[in-house]
Amino acid sequence: MVTYIEPAKELPVYHYDVVVAGGGTAGVVAAIASARTGAKTALIEAKGYVGGTMLEGGTTLHSFFTLGKYFHRESRQIVKGIAQEIIDRLVAVGGSTGHLEDKLGIDYDEHCTLIDVESVKLVEAEMLEEAGVDIWFNTLVAGADVENGHIRGMIAQSRVEGRIYFEAKTFIDATGWGDLSAYAGADYIVPKEYSIANSVGVAGVDVERYAKYIEENGGLTGITYGPRDGEEGQIVRIGASFWKVLSTLMAAHKKAQGKDPGYTEEELARNRIPVNVQKEMAKLALTLGITTIHENYFMYLKVNYVMKEGLSSQAEMTKAEIELRRRQAAALDLLRKNIPGCEKAFIARSSPTFCTRRGRTVICEHDISNAEILEGKHFDDDICYFGFHDLAPKYHVGGDGSYGIPLRAILVKGIDNLFAVGMMITTDYDAYMSTRNTVSCMGQGQAAGTLAAMAAKSGLPLRSIPVETLQTRLKADGVYLG
């Protein structure tokens, strides 16, 4: 490879107590917590808005509650604090349904909390401003200045100011991709063959007719009723079986083109689809479960794509961006031609870039295992509780329905002033399918922001502050810790 030596240059330096890299699900909460704890805080975000995967990967938040019905017990809310404040603010402006109970999904997540994408962008930005956070939009993490396992500064690239040096006492990596951790020399792994998505908003649809079709085809797995444009008792979320419904759709689509669907009506009725047909169906990877809090609108419709090399190939990432938009168009065409209520559907919103649920996994001081989650294990250094597992009903959180995320799980190994929060922790894939979920990320963010500020203000190293002191502060700020 031909190389180029970039000339040295002087960069403008900005001084902070705490710098949060990434304004997504965890980063916003971390920055608010840091500023409220008294630290001069900066939030660095590559896009022109906050919200991250919470907006672009789905619009139902999992989950503020433990699972109750499945275990014949009372469900209870175990995530509160700033995460709950955000929901309260959204409800006040019509940007969230609040916490609702699903009527069918007792073995998966009996509660869901729906959010409106555009409302979140404004509400969270205003909360950051009110807390006194300096927000740096359109600014990308581009490097780190590290000496003896200590980050002295973070380099960023601003569209307006060019390259910038952010000096701080403590840093929080909430990029979702582990960018800052990687630049700082932390150990990490890059998962291969992991699915990505670009979820779209689809307008011009009849939600009731869509739900009826899903149910009539045996695909309904969950349904939630709540406020839609202020009118209570409306369908706001539908869970749907991909294979049962999509097999019917693909058969209808092929017949409309005058092609042999490849199997008989009897086989279709029994959902016995040949392997070659299943592979063809899977190419589209359309998820038929939807959410909405507006009339005639699917706020969340997803197609997936698997990147074979993960983050290691820029060329494959570019290919993925294009392929996902092809799949969006194909999915829309499939809906319009085959599902009642979608005849006039059109894409009204898409994300500026694809969304991954798993970028780099950063190695921290404790690697949460799925065995610990299934046991419902709690630790002396718990910083938040969580109780949802995205691989249910295969796995359920044991014990009282909750497990603890220990402080050690977000302290980056080998770097003395860096946290990794959100979907970057936990190398155990099955465990990760719990810890990466939105509400868990928010809880991690509040703890990291709070301790980062406490360390910066006291001048003490992160690891020398007694965990009991952090837990006391978190409880005072509304965090549930038993």
Image (cartoon, grey):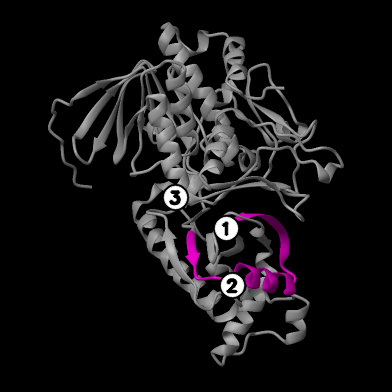
- Disc marking residue 281: 2
Give the extent of the magenta segment. Answer: 200-229
For badge 3, the amino acid type reads: Glu
Residue 69: % across, % down: 82, 45
* Farthest-out residue, front: 231
- Callout 2: 10 Å neighbours few (<14), some, many (20+)? some
Tell me the SS state at disc 2: helix
Residue 15 as seen in the image, left or right of residue 397: left
Q: Of marks 3 and 1, which one's residue comes earlier in the chain?
A: 3
* Image: 212 above or below 55: below
Instruction: Look at discs 3 and 2 and give the one toward the viewer.
Output: 3
Q: Are marks 1 and 2 in contact (CB under 8 Å)?
A: no
Label 3 close to label 2 by CB (< 8 Å): no
Report which residue position mark 3 lands on: 118
State yes or no: discs 3 and 1 in contact (Cβ < 8 Å).
Answer: no
Q: Residues within 10 Å of mark 3 (few under 14, many from 20)?
A: few
Residue type at the position of mark 1: Thr
**Residue 37: percent from the left, percent from the top?**
47, 17
Residue 210, magenta (yes or no): yes
Q: Is residue 376 left or right of residue 171?
A: right
* Residue drawn at the location 56% of the way across and 39% of the way down: 87
Q: Position of residue 408 (x, y in %)?
A: 57, 21
